[in-house]
Structure formats: C-alpha cells, structure tokens
Amino acid sequence: MRKHFWQGDAVNDEEFKNRLTNLNAHILKGHKVEFKIDEFFRACDRFSKKLVSDLLLRKSLTQVLVDSGESNAIDAEVAIDEIVSFIEEKALRSKLNAEFGNDNPFRSQKVSKPRPVFESWFPLGFLVQFLASNAPSLAVLS
C-alpha cells in the first residue's frame, strides 16, 4: 500500500481515491484558507539554508534520490544544489516579479518592465499540475 501526501496529510490508497472522488469539496476547502505568501518565502528560504548547512539531511535526501533509481549520487547532489538556489527567498521573489510584475501571484498586476521578458503570464484561475518524476528537481523547479 502506497502513501500519498494530500494537503498536509499522509493518506493510504483508499483514502486517496475517496478524496479524489470528492475533489470539489477539497478544492472549496482550499479556497477558504488564506495563503500567506511571505511565510511561504521565509519557509522556502529557511529550507534552502538547511539544505546547505545540515549535512545529515543532505546526505539523507541524496540517498533517497539514489535509492529511487532515478539518479546517481553526483546527479542527486546537482539536483539538490539546483533546488537550494531556486527556493532562496531572493530567487523566488525575482522569478515572480519577472513573471507577474510583483512578488505576489495572488495580486494581479500588468507586467510592464523596461527589460524584455521572454515569457510571462497572468493568473486566470486555479491550476493543478501533475508532474513526471523523471528528474529529481522537476517538481520544485516547475
């Protein structure tokens, strides 16, 4: 039996199927919760720093990636380094500013910058994204 991570809970296959069946109720529940973007930035930044400073955590995550069969030790280290630099608060804010025109994706603002933006978009609604697992850092970097 596999464990699934669903809105902060570890659930088994049966509960996962039940929640999928009642997806609308879970979506509505999620809409009632205020997402505190600054707390998210701080949490990502703290985790980024922990991935650099906590060698035991880093070794453990590297081993998880290697044991998954998706990565060797060198590629796992590279993936962790990519995640570290991507989730730093400054990097996240910069990415959101480039794509949204501000660092809060829940506040719509027209992107108007003097520098050209190769790719940008505007929030139009709710998006759920299922990702392939063929690259260890794919989920974080998407």
Image: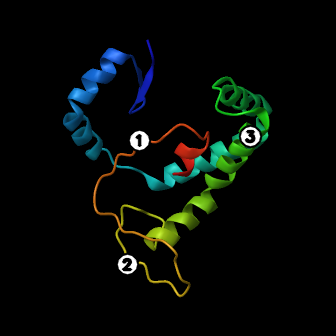
In the image, residue 48 lies at what x, y percent?
67, 46
- Reading the image, the residue beneath label 3 is 75
Q: Is residue 117 left or right of residue 123?
A: right
Q: Residue at x 25, y 40 (%)?
A: 27
In the image, residue 139 lies at what x, y percent?
53, 43
CA–CA distance in space, label 2 to label 3:
38 Å
- Reading the image, the residue beneath label 1 is 130
Q: Nearer the viewer, residue 41 or 124?
A: 124
Mark 3 residue element: helix
Mark 3 nearby-residue class (10 Å; few <14, some 14–19, many ≥20): some
Mark toward the viewer: 1 or 2: 1
Q: Earlier in the sequence, mark 2 or mark 3?
A: 3
- Check whether the beta carbons of the residues at disc 1 and disc 2 lie within 8 A of each other: no
Mark 1 nearby-residue class (10 Å; few <14, some 14–19, many ≥20): few
- Reading the image, the residue beneath label 2 is 110
Mark 1 residue element: loop
Q: Residue at x 41, y 41 (%)?
A: 130
Residue type indicated by callout 1: Phe
Mark 2 nearby-residue class (10 Å; few <14, some 14–19, many ≥20): few
CA–CA distance in space, label 1 to label 2:
28 Å
In the image, residue 66 lies at what x, y percent?
70, 28
Q: Is residue 109 left or right of residue 119?
A: left
In the image, residue 128 lies at what x, y percent?
35, 46
Residue type indicated by callout 2: Lys
Mark toward the viewer: 2 or 3: 3
What label sits on residue 27 in the rendered view? none
